Image (cartoon, rainbow, N blue to C red):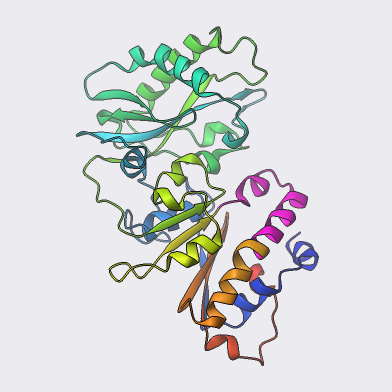
Amino acid sequence: MAPDLIRSLQAPSLATLLSRNTTHAAHAFDPDTRLLPHEAWLAHACGLAGDPAIQPAAPFAPAVMRGFGLQPDAGHWFICHPVHVQVGTHLMMPDLRNLQLTDAESRTLFEAAQPLFDAPGMALVYGDARTWFLRADDWADLATASPDAATGDNLHTWMPAGAAARDFRRLQNEVQMLWHSHPVNEPRKAPVNSFWIWAGAAADQPRIDVPLATRGAPGWLDALAQPELRDTTAIQWLADGGTKNAPHRLAVAGQLVSAGLAEDWGTWLQRLQQLEEQWFAPLLAGLKSGTVKDATIVLTNRRGWTATHTNKMALHKFWRPPTLTNLLT
């Protein structure tokens, strides 16, 4: 459907940025990896992991905890999400963005489950309604999957794997039984009936030193951003201008992910049109005026990502007509 989607787009600023470039490179990504490409790329860009194409990893948990104002003590920490799992011919986890869960409901379920995590080298810590944190030192070698990678698929493929997988499943079953008849879940059409862990890392992980802004991102990703640049606008981000000690800045616009996971291409087109107006047009204007020296646009799908670098000089390549065909690479 990609060619049809491109024909439906009216995105002249994005077309110019992608066509009049200094470099454009496509990078392959194993679709069976337990992450989506943008998650591995972001971990690398933030200095938390190596080359995303060679050793994809997303060890975000300690950094996200700090973003929530929590200080991870010694040990190995995971991001932990309360989730709804649909039971049918196989287990399936819908998009967590659509889980309606208040802070009061989440805290009640958290407090009910917390005693089950009371063991040496283990602790459950509350972040917000959708984001908790789990210390599990004996599970450091578990191979876990991001919730977005697992969304909408048979969960059997994406469950944590490794020597401690049986211990994880035992604890998960205990939590599921506890929550099955919990009063919080009685009136809910989508009961919170399980939890999902991922993004594990040791507490002594280095701090992120790249200024980050976010828009339309899940809570765990917002926590990585500077407080004043969480769910920000392109105008605000571009006006920030960076600092002498940190001239490179990073912005993550995540509005397309949920529509892409749902294969809701009408909504996807609408949101990309919003990105054109709210992000790509201001970025192009900044490059033309010289207020932005240069920019690299990273676009991802499940099978890889492209990186397109451009600057004011490249925008003068009038012999390159603006086109969106680079979206197909």
The image quadrant where one finds the N terminus is: bottom right
Magenta stretch mostly in which secondary structure?
helix
The one of 236 and 13 positioned closer to us in this rendering: 236
From this view, report whether residue 144 is shown above or below residue 254: above
Do we see residue 329 in this rendering? no
From this view, report whether residue 201 is shown above or below residue 133: below
Q: Position of residue 177 (x, y in %)?
A: 49, 10
Q: Identify which residue is drawn at 78% across, 51% down.
A: 266
**Residue 180: which quarter of the image?**
top right
Q: How many marks?
A: 0
Q: Position of residue 88 (x, y in %)?
A: 67, 22
Do we see residue 99 in this rendering? yes
The image quadrant where one finds the C terminus is: bottom right
Q: Is residue 263 magenta?
A: yes
- The residue stretch that appears in magenta: 254-276
Q: Is residue 270 magenta?
A: yes
* Direction from residue 266 to residue 129 in the image, left or right: left
* Direction from residue 139 to residue 256 in the image, left or right: right
Q: Position of residue 17 (x, y in %)?
A: 60, 76
Q: Identify which residue is drawn at 51% across, 38% down.
A: 147
Q: Position of residue 5 (x, y in %)?
A: 76, 62
The one of 260 and 171 positioned closer to us in this rendering: 260
